[in-house]
Image: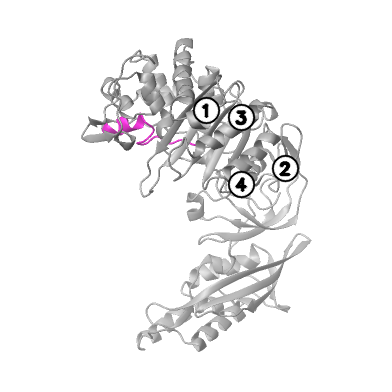
Amino acid sequence: MGKRRRVVERRTKRPAVIGGVIAVVVGGVGLGGYALYGGGAADAASKAASKPVKTGPLSATEVQTTARTFLTSWQQGKVPQAAAVTDDAKACVRLLTGYAKDAHITGVKLTEGTRTGAKVPFSVKATVSYKGVSKPLSYDSSFSVVRRTGDGEPVVNWHAAVVHPDLADGDTLATGESGAPPIKALDRDGGEITTSKYPSLGTVLDGLREKFGKKAGGKAGVELRVVRGAASEKAKLSDKTVLELSKGTPGTVKTTLSPTLQAAAEKQVTTQKNASVVVMRPSTGEIYAVANSSHGFNVAFQGSLAPGSTMKIVTSTMLFEKGLITPDASHPCPKTYKLAGWTFHNDDDSEIKKGTFKMAFGASCNNAFINFAPKLSNSDLTTEAQQVYGLGMNNWAIGVPTFDGSVPVQSGAQMGASLIGQGGVRMNPLNMASVASTVEAGTFHQPYLVSPTVDNRTLAKASRTMSAKTQSELKEVMQYTAAYGTAAKAMAGLGPDYGAKTGSAEVDGQKKPNGWFTAYKGDLVGAGVVQAGGHGGDTAGPIVAALLKLGSSL
């Protein structure tokens, strides 16, 4: 299945990491075990203290001598000697020891490239052997020579990436059986899903392998992989395959993805930088497409972003259910509104002096929502999101890792901000597609990528359903927005069985807001975000609308 990418779920089975001494073969010469400790470093430090500290730029001779000492020592298996010419001997010893013992890398040949100043590139050729299976390994890396703090001696600036460019500090290399067998993923029509056909689906395939590799009847292969350390785990990086020694036997997993819509989604996200989109079927929860213009992290499923005004769908649900407003009731949207010491502004300082709530929803006028804050309790929006929309419960089971939205209980100005999708509210396109799906269907159907019948898992449920009256009111304001409001340009020609909501979410440090858009057309829903793109109707809107138009013709 190729190299795995970032997912939240991680393997639990790894090759055992055993400490101690090592015996390696490098350059065709066998070396016995040797001690990895001693007082040499302390003696050297004591002597260095009496010498003047070297300063100034490194000479070519200093760089060359340090580089060759390091590379020659490493190649010959003399780990302490190699570590002695680095600025972190302990980390170097640990990683180079594991390079031979845990990664099972032998026959190491290191070839220095052309130096550029203090930077030294080099190539690695070696062999990885595990339980009778061997495969050649080759890659390029580099390091820089710097002056050591304290005595100014030239040393290798140590980072794990020196050993292999895929390593972050704290990571290690290990060879053994892969944690999960490979899979053959199929779309809803039975076609095979590959990253060559659908570049966005690398993380999805990784997630499917983690979840269904064993359940689908596959057999694990053997691989050299990066085993992540604590810092990488915190950054939500998963183990990564470096070299596959044997492929194993794949199991087969069928998904709900539509080949037509997935291919179209892949194309649509390339029209904007940092775009993500999800398409699903409201009546069942089946996910038809997921795509991201950036392939390193699945923002569409795992992103955690303020959803801006698309959150007004949930806020409006709460207001309608409480009887605080109706679509056609008169409700002004002032240019500014003060709440708990904050002054809230509308986009472009617009205002609606005499209008209806429906007009304010269609124009996405912020203060028509925030001015309800005094009539609400701090937990009202959180309760609505959880009970009706199934958000923020951390219990979705779609078949791959997801972030299920977060609507924390807040107070004061932050509570007011949450009503317009700012404050502490966090969502992704999957969450907002589900919100629009709940409106269209009238009840929450947890999205899923793999049928629950495959592994008998239980899908999440909402504790209650909105009333038919509330659903009708929501469809009225969303239809108005699609026909006459901020979504009208993107949704042109898709009516009349449609509805939409745009959003713009301000982000600290960004010149432009994140643009959001969610909409339905019959029994099809799409939602998307373009980070730092600007208004949702102009950025994410055309992406979502194009997919709804295509889907409605299938």
Q: Residue at x 55, y 66 (%)?
A: 161
Instruction: Identify the residue at image location x=61%, y=29%.
Output: 549
Query: On the rendered structure, is 191 left or right of 300?
Result: right
Q: Is residue 500 magenta?
A: no
Residue that numbered label 2 is attached to: 183
The picture places residue 44, in percent across and down from the top left corner, at: 43, 83
What range is drawn magenta here? Answer: 413-428
- Estimate how packed mark 1 is, as few (under 14), some (14 to 19) or many (20 or more) residues with alpha carbons within 10 Å: many
Label 3: which secondary element: helix
Among the two numbered marks 4 and 1 on one chain, the one whose residue lies closer to the N terminus = 4
- Label 4 close to label 3 by CB (< 8 Å): no
At 27% from the left and 23% from the top, the residue drawn is 353
Amino acid carrying label 1: it is Ala
Q: Is residue 421 magenta?
A: yes
Q: How many marks?
A: 4
Name the front one of labels 1 and 3: 3
Question: Nearer the N terminus, badge 1 or badge 3?
Answer: 1
Q: Separation of disc 4 and disc 3 at Cα?
A: 40 Å
In the displayed structure, would residue 229 be above or below residue 311?
below
CA distance for labels 4 and 1: 36 Å
Quadrant in the picture for the C terminus? top right
- Residue 120 is situated, as x and y percent measured from the top left of the image, at 55, 77
